[in-house]
Amino acid sequence: MKTKGKKALKVIAAAISLLLLAAVIFSSFVLYRFNCDKSGGENSYADIYNKAAVTLNVDDSGVFKILKINDTHFFNGTCENDAKTLDGINGVLSQNKYDLIVVDGDLVDGFNLKTDYDKYKAIDLFAQTVEKYNIPWTFAPGNNDGEIDGENEDVIAYMMRYGHFICANSKGVDGSMNLFIDLNFSGKLVHSIAVTDSLARTVKAIGKYDYIKENQAQWLLDGVEKRNVKTSVFFHMQTNEFQKAFDNGEAYKGFVMSDAYPYDEIENDFVFDEAVKDNENISLISCAHQHSNNMCSFYNGRYYQLSGASGYSAIGHDYLGPSLTEISINVTDENTKTMYSFNQIKI
């Protein structure tokens, strides 16, 4: 009996050792995937600090058209869902004229250990799709884009290889993208677009959602004050004020409204809301992130607009289906409420 007991203990000990070894190997692999950069390293993110605000011209119509694409959650660009998303985006771009494309975060899937996951291949196929239309495009980082196989900075550095991609950042400001795009009409600055980073999670991929920091809000306010024109702001994760806008604002006619998830779920997002609440030149705040939520409301003198998912690979309710958001700005209109028009395009 003693011999059998010893053998059993040896078997149990060996099994525990194997499990511990497997756990160590898996943990090491996960840590590697969290922290490695698979982008190829052709460009340096540090080059972003040499870039400044971009100026675009509005044509004689006085209307500037933005196509907003968000939460595509591309897996590798070639799987069935990704192919359907790319076909849909291509179809919209081939039939409509746009002056700017704003990729409003979560272009690619987040923490994913599948062997055929390839976010840089997906980014490349997406970029090839939009580049052929010769439209400037930019990127507001999402909470998933930099979770694995490279940070948001690596994603942006990779995007720098494409000729129509525009980006900028300021040293000392949080986030990997803080960019102003100025719009000129008849040789005069008439509107501005600000793109910023709503950050991700702390601890990375598994912790609580982070939030736009005070120095980012100050960067925005300083830029808005300097320009002194109406400004449309884009970032990925909504702030708490979106819940108030949904509940109490005036819904934009024809825009599907949904509150499948609470809009005020992110702690500390009041920091941004408090900073910008009295600024009359911030005329639009446009976000994404929640997949099944959808809204556009005029509230406290500005529009709060949030778009549902744009990709077939994004998880969420399918009552609406993947869609893109078309935002038109009539820069000759001084009335904030009437200068914008919004349209959802199913793909």
Image (cartoon, helix red, strand yellow):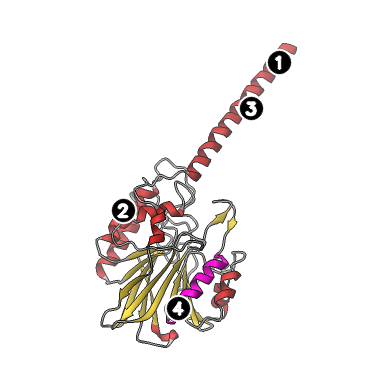
Q: In this rendering, does residue 156 appear at all? A: no
Specify which label sits upstream in the sequence, 1 or 3. 1
Q: CA distance from mark 2 to mark 3?
A: 45 Å
User: What number is the disc on residue 125?
Assistant: 2
Measured from the top left, where is residue 245 in percent x and y?
A: 54, 77
Q: Secondary structure at mark 4?
A: helix
Say which amino acid is labelled 2. Leu
Q: CA distance from mark 2 to mark 4?
A: 38 Å
Q: How many marks?
A: 4
Circle 3: residue type: Ile
Q: Position of residue 273 (x, y in %)?
A: 57, 73
Which quadrant is the C terminus positioned in? bottom left
- Residue on which the image places disc 3: 16
Q: How many other residues sit within 10 Å of disc 2, few (<14), some (14-19) or many (≥20)? A: some
- The image quadrant where one finds the N terminus is top right
**Earlier residue among tags 2 and 3:** 3
Secondary structure state at the residue bearing disc 1: helix
- Compared with residue 25, is residue 83 higher up or lower down, i.e. above or below? below
Disc with the residue nearer the chain's start (4 vs 3): 3
User: Mark 1 = which residue?
Assistant: 6
Observer able to see residue 266: yes
The magenta-colored residue range is 212-229
Of marks 4 and 3, the one in the foreground: 4
SS for dot 3: helix
Looking at the rendered structure, the kind of residue marked 4 is: Lys
Q: Residue furthest right?
A: 2
Q: Nearer the viewer, mark 1 or mark 2?
A: 2
Q: Secondary structure at mark 2?
A: helix
Q: Which mark is residue 226?
A: 4
Residue 324 on image: x %, y %: 38, 67
